[in-house]
Image (tube, rainbow, N blue to C red):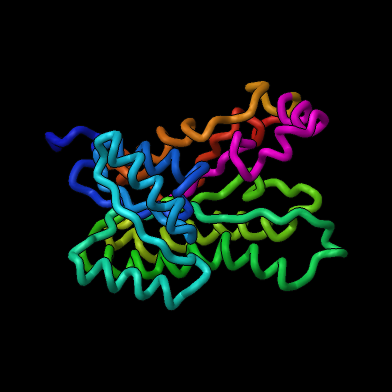
Amino acid sequence: MTSVPLFSLHGRTALVTGSSRGLGRAMAEGLAVAGARVIINGTNSARVAEAVSQLRDAGHSVDGATFDVNSEADIIAEFKRFDAEGIAIDILVNNAGIQFRKPMVELATSDWQRVIDTNLTSAFVIGREAATRMIARGSGKIINIGSLTSELARATVAPYTVAKGGIKMLTRAMAAEWAQHGIQANAIGPGYMLTDMNQALVDNPEFDAWVKGRTPAKRWGRPEELVGTAVFLASNASDYVNGQIIYVDGGMSVVL
């Protein structure tokens, strides 16, 4: 048995995409509290800088990386910068994502592609760049953020549903190819969470009542409630867990 605490992330560096706010911010802070050096990512440099400043003020080791997860060139350049600066990404959380609500018969191909690219293709590209380096070191943790829609469909969010279903299978594909190199790739499937992305739904009395009625916990989830699962999947505690998706949804996915 190792003398290092099972859930400690001390000495490790975590890149969390889309982490200047929302679920990504909550997970980034949670990983930092567990001891990781965290790299905050977003496309808005001011928002990234603000998040970095706030977490540093709280005593954490934090840096920023402003790049667009939809730009393969930017991703490759960022990882080359990490290499040049001696930054090894031990933990990758593929969190960046967008939502777009419209019936499929009214959905433009460009909007479909934008959601697929942001929510799924970016996880592949960033995962590939991180894993290439993890393989060379013989260890690494990849956490992909799925959704209830990794399992269940809902009207008007087809591209999001397809992307998040793809995240589940991408996670399994990563495990199939990279487990032999000491990499664990797993996913988290959040339920309905109190985030900026969902604020319009929270403010809709009918939808709010539906979420609370449909969820056994009878409430929305809070972003910080993803932290325990994220820390588990990022730590030595999950070293023999691979290709799984853990739903943090108040029980919604298991009841009719």
Q: In the visual, does 54 lie left or right of 195?
A: left
Q: Image point 59% across, 39% down: which residue? A: 195
Asked if residue 174 is among those painted magenta in the image, a careful observer would answer no
Magenta extent: 184-212
Quadrant containing the C terminus is top right
Q: In the visual, does 127 lie left or right of 192?
A: left
Question: Is 25 above or below relative to 249?
Answer: below
**Image position, residue 101 (x, y; %):** 76, 54
Of residue 50 and residue 159, the one placed in the foreground of this image is 50
Q: Image point 59% across, 68% down: which residue? A: 117
Query: In this orientation, does residue 227 appear?
Result: yes
Query: In this orientation, does residue 184 appear?
Result: no
**Image position, residue 18 (x, y; %):** 48, 53
Asked if residue 199 is among those painted magenta in the image, a careful observer would answer yes
**Image position, residue 151 (x, y; %):** 65, 47
Q: In the visual, does 165 lie left or right of 246?
A: right
Q: Residue furthest left?
A: 3
Q: Image point 48% across, 31% down: which residue? A: 225
Q: In the visual, does 118 lie left or right of 255?
A: left
Of residue 147 and residue 99, the one placed in the foreground of this image is 99
Question: Is 14 above or below relative to 253?
Answer: below
Quadrant containing the N terminus is top left
